Image: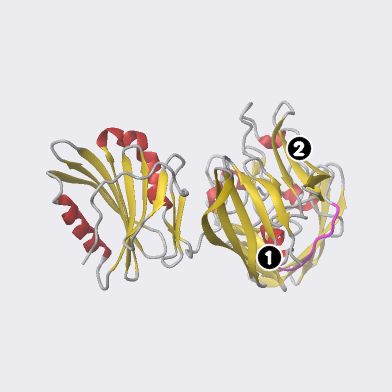
């Protein structure tokens, strides 16, 4: 009933690619650099891969009404017959979607061979997918990290991926200083048993502080209050996020960035992408227990879209963001947006990138709708004087996509101080020639503590995908369809 591949076979020395995809099963597997990978030649053996004496197989079988653990136990029994001794070291259920996932490790011995076996079993409906990866016991420690990468690298292409937030740090002065005067935000508020409305308006900006006017409607005595937020983050009003007196900084910096999640909220008819934080209020010593949930967005003056604590709930209902950020933190002249970089071109537009080695990737817009763009991505490898197709797959871009940002590394590798303390990054505009075409460019330059360039990336809104030269990937040619 089951087809289990047991033989260890030699694989060809050249790899067709390091990524295997199967559109019918909706799976993708990538092997690390240095491993060879070849597509299988029958329906049960999907792919084989090898590095030195470590061999692996990706297999598939379709079986109705069988539990995943029962299937894994049957495979174990079948393999056990080929060895004099077999010991299971690990068996763990993995929380991964979709389907069910089970990982096991074994030691297997004969008179001449001692192997460490890594096995991954996945069940989705009636489809059972396996990774069987034996390696000599003597080489296990050397290869175990790459073996783990292979096991962890299997994924379903239609799986819903949790969106990771871009780097974000709330600072009350920066949250207002990035906007022009007369920017405002309106909130519905429930506080201390009352319901009403608050309107916060950026009244004036100075070198070392900003002034905020707050109008209270149906709350307390009503009226208007003035608040001054200083450049160091302290305020004459009440900061709802909380300020740590121990280190003279906003309490939000004491939390692991992993506590931030990406969520979208609606303000009127506008959908705003937010950094959701629910770590509660503590100080730099970890003290304090006030629960707090906040949704931040750099699109909104003051950055606070929604706030919930035991005393109040505040939800933004409208805002107006005027241009004119402070000179201390100028807005970039260019911002990369993954969705716009393709949506601004017609179906049939194509771009070819030079990758490391004799590898090229050609991306073409296959179809477009209001919410989804489908790209065809073809990998090309040079053989002799010819470029031949290695693989082809489809890539979907869903709107709204999270645009890659110009995030700074956390610390300078040279002095170990925060990169934000160094010379500010530059965004330079210019022109370049690509073939016979002249294109507009935006170059992003990052500097280290000595003021020397450590990273340079070039973008162009004239080229599909906007990426022109990011070091490991460079545009060779492109075509804009009409």
Q: Residue at x 38, y 58 (%)?
A: 95
Residue 188, percent from left and from top: 70, 70
Quadrant of the image containing the C terminus: bottom right
Is residue 213 or residue 453 the one in the foreground? 453
**59 shown above or below 373:** above
Question: What segment carries the magenta color?
Answer: 312-324
Q: How many discs mark residues in the rendered view? A: 2
The quarter in which the N terminus is drawn is bottom left
Q: Secondary structure at mark 1?
A: loop
Q: Main secondary structure of the magenta part?
A: strand
Residue at 44%, 65% in the rendered image: 26
- Based on the picture, tell me whether residue 315 belongs to the magenta stretch: yes
Q: Dot 2 lies on which element?
A: loop
Residue that carries the numbered disc 2 in the rendered image: 424
Q: Closer to the camera, 330 or 481?
A: 481
Residue indicated by mark 1: 348
Does 82 appear above or below 357? below
Label 2 crowding class (10 Å Cα cut-off): few <14, some 14-19, many 20+? some
Q: Position of residue 18 (x, y in %)?
A: 46, 48
Q: Position of residue 113 (x, y in %)?
A: 19, 37
Mark 2 → mark 1, Cα distance in angstroms: 39 Å
First along the sequence among labels 2 and 1: 1
Question: Which residue is more in the foreground, 315 or 353?
Answer: 353
Q: Is residue 325 visible?
A: yes
Residue 200 appears in the picture as rendered: no
The percent coordinates of residue 338 (x first, y second) are: 67, 57
């Amino acid at each position: 009933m089951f087809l289990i591949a047991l033989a260890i076979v030699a694989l060809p020395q050249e790899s067709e690619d390091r990524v295997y995809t199967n559109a019918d099963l909706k799976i993708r597997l990538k092997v690390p650099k240095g491993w060879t990978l070849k597509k299988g030649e029958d329906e049960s053996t999907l792919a084989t891969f090898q590095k030195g004496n470590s061999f692996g197989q990706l297999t598939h079988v379709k079986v109705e009404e069988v539990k995943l653990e029962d299937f894994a136990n049957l495979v174990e029994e079948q393999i056990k017959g080929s060895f004099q001794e077999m010991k299971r070291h690990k068996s763990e259920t993995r929380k991964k979607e979709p389907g069910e996932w089970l990982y096991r490790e074994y030691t297997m011995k004969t008179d001449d061979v001692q192997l460490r076996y890594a096995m991954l079993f996945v069940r989705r409906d009636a489809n059972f997918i396996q990774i069987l990866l034996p390696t000599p016991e003597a080489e296990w420690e050397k290869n175990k990290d790459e073996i783990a990468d292979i096991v962890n690298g299997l994924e379903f292409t239609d799986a819903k991926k949790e969106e990771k937030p871009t780097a974000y740090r709330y600072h009350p002065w920066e949250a207002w200083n990035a906007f022009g005067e007369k920017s405002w935000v309106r909130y519905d508020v429930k506080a201390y048993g009352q319901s009403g409305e608050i309107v916060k308006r950026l009244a004036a900006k100075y070198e070392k502080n900003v002034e905020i006017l707050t109008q209270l409607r149906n709350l307390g005595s009503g009226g208007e209050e003035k608040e001054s937020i200083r450049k160091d983050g302290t305020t004459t009003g009440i900061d709802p996020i909380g300020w740590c007196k121990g280190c003279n900084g906003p309490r939000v910096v004491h939390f692991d960035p992993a506590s931030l999640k990406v969520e979208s909220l609606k303000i009127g008819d506008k959908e705003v992408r937010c950094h959701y934080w629910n770590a509660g209020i503590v100080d730099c010593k970890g003290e304090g227990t006030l629960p707090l949930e906040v949704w931040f967005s750099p699109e909104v003056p003051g950055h606070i879209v929604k706030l919930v604590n035991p005393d109040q709930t505040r939800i933004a209902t409208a805002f107006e963001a005027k241009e004119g950020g402070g000179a201390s933190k100028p807005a970039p002249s260019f911002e990369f947006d993954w969705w716009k970089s393709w949506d601004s071109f017609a179906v049939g537009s194509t771009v070819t990138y030079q990758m490391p080695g004799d590898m090229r990737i050609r991306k073409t817009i296959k179809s477009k709708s209001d919410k989804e763009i489908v790209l065809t991505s073809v990998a090309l490898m040079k053989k002799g004087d010819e470029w031949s197709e290695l693989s082809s797959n489809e890539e979907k871009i869903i709107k709204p996509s999270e645009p890659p940002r110009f995030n700074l590394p956390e610390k300078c590798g040279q002095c170990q101080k925060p990169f934000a303390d160094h010379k500010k990054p530059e965004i330079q505009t210019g022109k370049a020639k690509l073939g016979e075409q002249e294109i507009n460019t935006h170059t992003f330059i990052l500097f280290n503590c000595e003021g020397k360039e450590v990273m340079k990336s070039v973008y162009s809104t004239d080229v599909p995908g906007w990426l022109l030269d990011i070091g490991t990937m460079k545009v060779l040619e492109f075509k804009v369809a009409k």
